[in-house]
Image (tube, grey):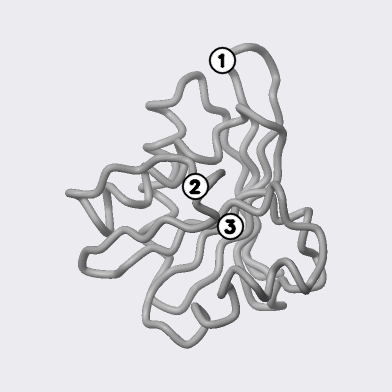
């Protein structure tokens, strides 16, 4: 681990700003693994990343689509693994094909696919402290 920073977010807008700060370190080819409960701020964080890399994109949770693509100076491939629990299901989504594309892979519910997470990645962990307050821990793993 080369980097760890802890943030406290008081709102979705704060979470988006934190993501913009992290976006300064992220580049094409990076993988971001999100961990946290439902409603903890993962999609808001991706909105902040998209504001930096794909400012004209409308970000929404890819829960039913599995993946949403946002195009901009660096594309973001936004996955939701809530319903994925094994490699056969993961393979059928086309997930592994995205590793060969030029962009950022951002994965919600990464705890469901520990077998598929690359060693070199960013982990972003969301902890609910109250209805609106979150602790967001960002780590660069390698």
Helix, strand or loop at mark 3: strand
> What residue did someone put label 2 on?
62
Mark 2 or mark 3, which is nearer to you? 2
Which label belongs to residue 132?
Answer: 1
Q: CA distance from mark 1 to mark 3?
A: 22 Å
Q: Position of residue 14 (x, y in %)?
A: 42, 28
Quadrant in the rendering for residue 42? top right
> Considering the image in quadrants, where does the N terminus appear?
bottom right
> CB under 8 Å between callouts 2 and 1?
no
Q: Position of residue 73 (x, y in %)?
A: 21, 68
Give whichever of discs 1 and 3 has the lower sequence position: 3
The answer to which of 129 and 74 lies nearer the viewer is 74
Mark 2 or mark 3, which has the lower sequence index?
A: 2
Q: Residue furthest bottom?
A: 100
Can residue 121 be seen at all in this image of the molecule? yes
Name which residue lies at 35% across and 43% down.
59
Disc ID at residue 107:
3
Q: CA distance from mark 2 to mark 1?
A: 22 Å
Mark 1, residues whose alpha carbon is within 10 Å: few (<14), some, or many (≥20)? few
Which residue is drawn at the image coordinates 66% and 54% (left, top)? Answer: 81
């Amino acid at each position: 681990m080369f980097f760890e920073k802890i943030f406290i977010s008081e709102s979705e807008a704060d979470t988006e700003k934190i993501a913009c700060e992290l976006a300064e370190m992220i580049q094409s080819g990076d993988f971001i693994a999100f961990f946290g409960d439902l409603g903890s701020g993962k999609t808001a964080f991706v909105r902040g990343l998209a504001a930096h890399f794909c400012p004209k994109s409308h970000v929404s949770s890819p829960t039913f689509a599995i993946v949403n693509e946002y195009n901009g100076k660096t594309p973001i491939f936004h996955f939701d693994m809530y319903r994925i629990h094994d490699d056969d299901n993961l393979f059928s989504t086309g997930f592994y094909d995205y590793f060969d594309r030029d962009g950022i892979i951002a994965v919600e519910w990464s705890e469901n696919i520990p077998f598929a997470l690359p060693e070199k990645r960013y982990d972003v962990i969301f902890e609910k402290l109250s209805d609106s307050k979150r602790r967001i821990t960002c780590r660069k793993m390698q």
